[in-house]
Amino acid sequence: MSKHERWNTLLELLAASGKLEVEEAATALDVSAATIRRDLDELAEQQLLVRTRGGAVVHGVSYELPLRYKSTRHAPEKRRIAEAVADLVAPGEVVGLNGGTTTEVARALALRFASGRAEAPGAAVSAGPALTVVTNALNIAGELAVRPQIKIVTTGGVARPQTYELVGPLTVGVLNEVVLDVVVLGVDGVDPELGVMAHQEDEASISRLFAERASRVVVVTDSSKMGRRAFARICGLDRIDLLVTDAGIAQETVAQLTEAGVKVLTV
């Protein structure tokens, strides 16, 4: 196991329980306690955790993995989800992508709308963009900025280094001036009673505004976040039209979401 893989696993274990013991981690990763101590020391230097005498703890209750470590988790599921979402978008639509949405969704959209691939047979070639994307995510903007067939609109705002997400009054100002056909929301938790949630309150408020500006709201998340709660509520299930997730979702959860009026698509 490489150092990068060990770090990803250690951060996932820490996110799940809030604390981690050296011996416990050494057993889980099948490496020496000395290796784990060095890993935890290096992660602490990057302010990804707080070292304790026997292990490590998270920085706070609303612990969140930096995006560069989250991006490798459940990668196959995220790719399938992204491809399914891209198929739901029609040519010429205005799509909102929040900072919680993976770059996999952006890449899938770019492939779908590359060089007229999404045009219906015999349709006239449009002079406008194949797709317009509005986002507050710097990584998504960077992914799509080089795609000439896609018009990319970025909000202003203050960047959060953990997620590359722009938040604050400048972000709100731009979103208040646009109208979206559909928004694709990445979230940190889905609860049948509370709705969808994010770890950070400023990100949740921007995602809520994205939902308010859109005619259709699509939530994308892997099944590991089902039944999980996060600190800040984005919106209730009554605002969501479709949830796209992987086949690992429990049928009981599907039934609860369907009863709440949310269509569930598993891939």
Image (spheres, rainbow, N blue to C red):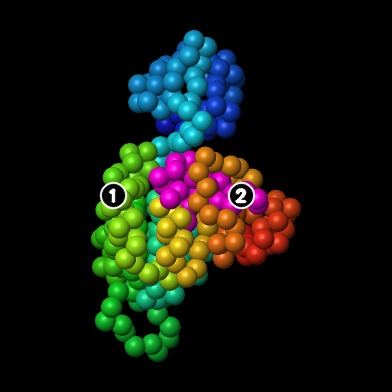
Residue 109 placed where, x, y %? 40, 64
Circle 2: residue type: Leu
* Residue at disc 2, secondary structure: loop
**What residue sits right under mark 2 in the picture?**
194
Q: Residue at x 31, y 84 (%)?
A: 125
Could you tell which of marks 1 and 2 lies nearer the N-terminus? 1
Q: Residue at x 39, y 21 (%)?
A: 44
Residue 264 placed where, x, y %? 63, 62
Circle 1: residue type: Gly
Quick check: can you spot residue 21? yes
Q: Is residue 197 rendered magenta in the image? A: yes
| CA separation in Å, label 1 and label 2 | 28 Å
**What residue sits right under mark 1 in the picture?**
157
Q: Is residue 199 left or right of residue 180?
A: right
* Highlighted range, magenta: 185-205
Residue 103 placed where, x, y %? 40, 53
**Label annotation for residue 147:** none
Quarter location, residue 236: bottom right
* Residue at disc 1, secondary structure: loop
Q: Is residue 265 left or right of residue 233?
A: right
